[in-house]
Image (cartoon, rainbow, N blue to C red):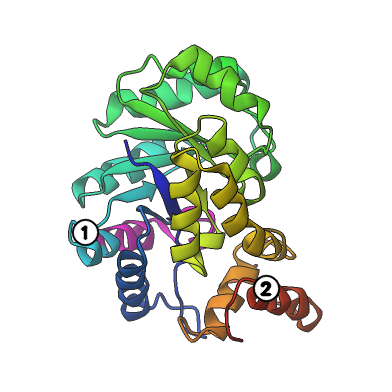
């Protein structure tokens, strides 16, 4: 089980929209140095919706190559078609990912039974550890705790990223799955409380810009030091909010570009951060101790 701060890594791009692999290597090396506990490659924050299937596999493979065993790599391989999710998951296994993160099928709004059969089919087709990903704010479908608990009986489904912000789900899922099933927060703003309630980690957007602080916050929360975790998290509260002032990953890419970490590249239909929205992001970065 991977515990702690797992960064939902951006996919750096040049101004013309090409994937910047040199920039990707720079980010991977930085996260290793900063103590990030795991990398999620080509998830929502990594623009999985704007890159094609070949690029998807290439970015995962390069991330694994750059990590070179120093840090676990979890590949985002979810899709709204079961067959496509299986292809992406097979690719992730072939290029050496440690696990896969599979978002619930989006747009087509399957039933709970459909969600169960979708994830069970992928798990049976590809022998790699798989983490469910529930983010109804983006997918328009909510995987209920009862469905997560059913899927936890599938041997290689090993955890869930729960991004509703509903902290009551920590205990609900834990009581039905036991301690061997990993519970990850997908909501930075409530991640500290999530961990203190018994969660195992956070798959974090905020960790893109303050990886060391997120690692320390998670470390404190996982050890039960609520006071230290709250102290660290207090300085990051502005980032947790401001990095969603426009659709993710627009603000976090702007923040990383302002730090000199990546070029100003993003793909349509996403656009670069608007001028008015720069103010709250910049203010939150300063609150977190970043120079911008």
Image disc number at residue 169:
none
Question: Residue at left 62%, top 25%?
Answer: 169
Q: How many marks?
A: 2
Most foreground residue, 102 or 121: 102
> Is residue 53 a member of the stretch shown in magenta?
yes
Quarter of the image holding residue 246?
A: bottom right
> Could you say where residue 97 lies in the image, as x and y percent from the top left?
26, 48
Q: Is residue 265 visible?
A: no
Quarter in which the C terminus is drawn:
bottom right
> Could you say where residue 31 lies in the image, as x and y percent from the top left?
36, 66
Up the image or down, 6 lies above or below 179; here it is below
Question: Residue at left 38%, top 14%?
Answer: 153
> Could you say where residue 206 lies in the image, as x and y percent from the top left?
56, 61
Q: Is residue 257 visible?
A: yes
Most foreground residue, 187 or 41: 187
Mark 2: which secondary structure? helix
Residue, disc 2: 287
Mark 1: which secondary structure? loop
Residue, disc 1: 70
Q: Residue furthest right?
A: 276
Calculate the distance from the C-alpha at mark 2 to the C-alpha at mark 1.
Answer: 31 Å
Compared across the picture, whether 220 is left or right of 193 comes to left
Q: Which residues are magenta?
A: 43-61
Q: Residues within 10 Å of mark 1 (few under 14, many from 20)?
A: some
Instruction: Name the N-terminal-most of marks 2 and 1.
Output: 1
Most foreground residue, 282 or 57: 282
Question: Residue at left 45%, top 74%?
Answer: 12
Compared across the picture, whether 206 is left or right of 11 comes to right
Up the image or down, 122 lies above or below 84; here it is above
């Amino acid at each position: 089980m991977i515990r702690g701060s797992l960064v939902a890594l951006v996919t750096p791009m040049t101004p013309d929209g090409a994937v910047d692999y040199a920039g990707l290597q720079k980010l991977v090396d930085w996260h290793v140095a900063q103590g990030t506990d795991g990398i999620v490659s080509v998830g929502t924050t990594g623009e999985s919706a704007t890159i094609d299937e070949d690029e998807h596999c290439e970015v995962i493979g390069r991330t694994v190559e750059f990590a070179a065993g120093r840090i676990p790599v979890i590949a985002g391989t979810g899709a709204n078609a079961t067959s496509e999710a299986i292809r992406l998951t097979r690719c992730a296994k072939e290029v050496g990912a440690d696990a896969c993160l599979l978002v619930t099928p989006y747009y087509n709004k399957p039933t709970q039974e459909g969600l169960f059969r979708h994830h069970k089919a992928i798990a049976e087709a590809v022998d790699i550890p798989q983490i469910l990903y529930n983010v109804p704010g983006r997918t328009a479908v909510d995987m209920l705790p009862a469905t997560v608990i059913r899927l936890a009986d599938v041997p290689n489904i090993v955890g869930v990223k729960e991004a509703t912000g509903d902290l009551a789900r920590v205990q609900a899922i834990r009581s039905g799955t036991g301690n061997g099933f990993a519970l990850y927060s997908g909501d930075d703003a409530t991640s500290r409380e999530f961990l203190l309630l018994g969660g195992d980690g956070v798959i974090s957007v905020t960790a893109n810009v303050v990886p060391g602080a997120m690692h320390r916050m998670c470390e404190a929360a996982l050890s039960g030091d609520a006071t230290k975790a709250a102290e660290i998290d207090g300085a990051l509260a502005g980032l947790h909010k401001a990095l969603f002032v426009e659709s993710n990953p627009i603000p976090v890419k702007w923040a990383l570009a302002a730090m000199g970490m990546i070029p100003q590249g993003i793909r349509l239909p996403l656009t670069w951060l608007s001028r008015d929205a720069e103010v709250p992001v910049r203010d939150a970065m300063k609150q977190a101790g970043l120079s911008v």
